[in-house]
Image: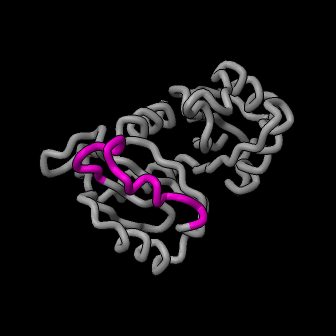
Amino acid sequence: MVKYVALMRGINVGGHRKIKMADLKVVVRDAGFEAVQTYVQSGNVVFGGAEKPVKEVAATLEAACKKVFGFPIEIIVRDKDTFRAEAEACPYASDTLEPTDGREPRFLHVAFLSATPDATRVLAVIDSYGGPEDTTLKGDALYIYYREGSGRSDFSKLLTEKKLGVSPTSRNWNTVLKLLDMLDA
């Protein structure tokens, strides 16, 4: 059995596109997966199943969710090894996955991307913004350290499919670490 993490985009935000995690667990299980666990209301799901390409797993979950919940949800899926590798590649965390240089985990985010973006396009978005955030693009992940917190930053407004050319969904570092723990259990 391969373990996966599914990261849902844009659910339970501002009272819109509401999904109960208990209902989501049932949908994922009914889609043919097992050992389904959710974490917080933003749509993080850890589960197991047969080895398949992550795009196929995402498409299966997206179709099941649309059928049950009645609206489309984009879902970015990573297998356990890829998710761990992306966490370990974070330039703002040490080998023990602790944030470096006195950084706070709640200000460290990873934008998981639906595909490998055109780096030139992403760097143009980053360069167009004059804020204090530290950003690094590595493969299908954009690492962001919000020096003043993500809630005060306008950088998040730039993280759109239209601007990046790929879909992003961000998780703070505490969530990334919790999902790693769940994948390892």
Residue at 79% x, 31% y: name it.
69
Outermost bottom residue: 120
User: Vertical placement of 180 versus 161: above or below?
Assistant: above
Residue at 13% x, 51% y: name it.
101
Outermost left residue: 102
Left or right: 59 with respect to 178? right
Point out residue 102 in the picture as x, y percentages from the top left corner. 13, 45
In the foreground, 35 or 98 = 98
Queried whether the magenta region covers residue 45, the answer comes back as: no
In what quadrant of the picture does the N terminus appear? top right
Point out residue 182 in the picture as x, y percentages from the top left corner. 49, 31
Left or right: 86 with respect to 60? left
Left or right: 110 with respect to 46? left
Point out residue 17 in the picture as x, y percentages from the top left corner. 68, 33
**The quarter of the displayed image where residue 133 is located:** bottom left
| Residue range corresponding to the magenta coloring | 145-162
Queried whether the magenta region covers residue 149, the answer comes back as: yes
Residue at 60% x, 44% y: name it.
9
Residue at 23% x, 59% y: name it.
132
Point out residue 183 in the picture as x, y percentages from the top left corner. 51, 36
Q: Is residue 4 visible?
A: no
Outermost top residue: 22
